[in-house]
């Protein structure tokens, strides 16, 4: 249970309700609300309330929240001011909506739907959410008088899931063609859940790798599932992966998993991708078993920001020391055993660290390539600043303060050398730096690198700022040079209206 931290802006006493939804991504039912337990606010006439969330259809980045007054013993209307926030794992606000003042009638006759929040981090749960738990807080104040003290109440809703993971090995992959299929059946431990059948095939072009997932016949009305499929290399490391969710509303539905990789890409480096002509796929699947817990957890402590400063300093001391030591190792070039040559500058670095962070470098220094013999890797297509930023991340997990155009260059290098964590970092920073002036450039880049998450995020931003962007010279140039991409974006606008 996280602590909740008040700042100077929260000096006015109020009631705070914090609701944690565990495994919230399995709430895939469009149009069906997930509702908190009923909670009582003693300081506001012992009134009773619920908070609910609704994922909007076709809009993965939108969640509607509704605060509803339930039936209680107070016979009059209640006017309150409230504010909703999304919290991180330590109770700090990631996103806060504007305060809303509303008059609630008794017995649930009136409800106020809060404005839908465009939350990019809802989509990228690995990056922003703690252990796949969405934590929402709502602060409430009386408008007729000030509360004497602040109070805090916690609630928890858990969607129970069953997780399974396995390695799927596809032998003789080089001879695999579009007339063949490989099928694997995943049997859950619970007898109430259906088997999931995975079918691997190639498209008619004999290149696009398709995975379809179906369920065996089930008595359940609907089954929500989230799967991550990872292409592994010869060192057992991740090459490319994707994660998606699907709601089986009938037993004959087919889940077409997003395109992971092409056969051409795999065949381009068989030593790395297809050891002994075997494709290794790691599959991690979860299936929802419904709501297991929906309860009030009680009160917890309220601590000051100054206390938290001391806690943060203690928690990060060891990791900061390691990062600083590795940064010093990079700067001092002590014990370096390989040189990376950029356009004009050389960097003395360490093979072991490069190999641990990049499977491409690992292959380069393992097999009998010229770089292994010469102890110099020529990277003339990478400018000095970009290579330095890449190495800074390899050693310290940080990239410094970079502008969006520098992030594009860094992403491209991370993609080339399969540094997936750096790609995720760049994606996150690009989302944060997105504006009407660079949206078209970042959209083209995301499309070129087949980054579906970044591409969708930028397209949603463009549709949000449609008038301003569609009238710009950049959009006109995009329509001329990237007509298919422009039409695809406009199509999204049509189906969302």
Image (cartoon, rainbow, N blue to C red):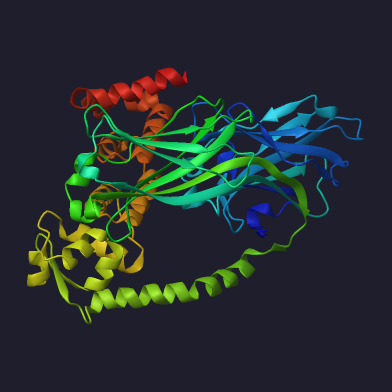
Extreme-bottom residue of the structure: 335
Horizontally, residue 295 falls left or right of residue 165, namely: right
Whether 295 is drawn above or below 198: the answer is below
Image quadrant holding the N terminus, namely: bottom right
Identified at 63% across, 57% down, the residue is: 7
Image spot of residue 384 (x, y percent): 16, 61
Identified at 83% across, 38% down, the residue is: 48
Q: Quadrant of residue 422?
A: bottom left
**Depth order, front residue of 266/298:** 266
Identified at 55% across, 54% down, the residue is: 130
**Depth order, front residue of 63/279:** 279
Whether 167 is drawn above or below 120: the answer is below
Horizontally, residue 51 falls left or right of residue 382, namely: right
**Depth order, front residue of 477/211:** 211
Identified at 22% across, 46% down, the residue is: 266
Res 302 visible: yes
Image spot of residue 460 (x, y percent): 41, 31
Q: How many marks?
A: 0
Image spot of residue 432 (x, y percent): 40, 46
Horizontally, residue 206 falls left or right of residue 464, namely: left
Horizontally, residue 92 falls left or right of residue 465, namely: right
């Amino acid at each position: 249970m996280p602590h909740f931290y008040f700042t100077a802006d929260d000096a006015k006493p109020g009631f705070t309700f914090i609701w944690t939804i565990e495994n919230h991504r399995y709430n895939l039912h469009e149009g069906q609300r997930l509702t908190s337990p009923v909670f009582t606010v003693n300081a506001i006439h012992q009134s009773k309330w619920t908070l609910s969330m609704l994922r909007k259809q076709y809009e993965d980045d939108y969640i509607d929240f509704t605060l509803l007054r339930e039936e209680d013993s107070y016979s009059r209307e209640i006017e309150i001011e409230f504010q909703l926030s999304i919290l991180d794992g330590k109770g700090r606000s990631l996103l806060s909506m504007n305060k809303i003042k509303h008059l609630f009638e008794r017995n649930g006759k009136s409800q106020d739907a809060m404005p839908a929040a465009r939350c990019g981090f809802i989509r990228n749960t690995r990056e922003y959410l703690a252990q796949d738990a969405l934590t929402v807080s709502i602060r409430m104040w009386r408008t007729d008088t000030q509360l004497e003290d602040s109070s805090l109440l916690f609630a928890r809703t858990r969607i129970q899931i069953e997780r399974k993971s396995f390695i799927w090995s596809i032998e003789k992959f080089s001879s695999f063609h579009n007339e063949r299929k490989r099928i694997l059946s995943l049997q859950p431990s619970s007898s109430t859940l259906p088997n999931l059948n995975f079918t691997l095939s190639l498209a008619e072009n004999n290149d696009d790798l398709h995975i379809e997932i179906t369920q065996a016949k089930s008595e359940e009305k609907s089954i929500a599932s989230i799967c991550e499929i990872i292409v592994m290399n010869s060192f057992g490391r991740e090459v490319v992966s994707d994660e998606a969710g699907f709601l089986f509303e009938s037993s004959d539905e087919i889940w077409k998993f997003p395109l992971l990789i092409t056969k051409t890409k795999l065949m381009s480096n068989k030593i790395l991708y297809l050891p002994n002509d075997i494709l290794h796929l790691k599959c991690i699947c979860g299936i929802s078993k419904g709501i297991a817990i929906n309860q009030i957890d009680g009160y917890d402590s309220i601590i000051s920001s100054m206390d938290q400063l001391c806690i943060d300093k203690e928690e990060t001391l060891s990791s900061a020391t390691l990062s600083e030591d590795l940064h010093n190792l990079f700067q001092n070039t002590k014990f370096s055993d390989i040189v990376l040559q950029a356009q004009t500058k050389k960097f003395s670095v360490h093979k072991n660290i490069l190999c641990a962070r990049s499977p491409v470098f690992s292959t380069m220094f393992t097999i009998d390539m010229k770089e292994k013999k010469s102890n110099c890797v020529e990277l003339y297509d990478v400018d000095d600043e970009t290579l330095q930023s890449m190495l800074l991340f390899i050693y310290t997990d940080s990239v410094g303060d970079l502008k969006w155009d520098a992030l594009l260059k860094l992403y491209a290098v991370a993609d080339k050398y399969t540094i997936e964590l750096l790609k995720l970092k760049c994606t996150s920073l690009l989302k944060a730096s997105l504006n009407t002036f660079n949206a078209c450039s970042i959209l083209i880049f995301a499309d070129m690198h087949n980054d579906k998450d970044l591409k969708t995020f930028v397209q949603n931003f463009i549709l949000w700022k449609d008038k301003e962007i569609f009238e710009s010279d950049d959009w006109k140039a995009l329509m001329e040079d990237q007509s298919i991409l422009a039409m695809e974006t406009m199509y999204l606008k049509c189906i969302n209206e």
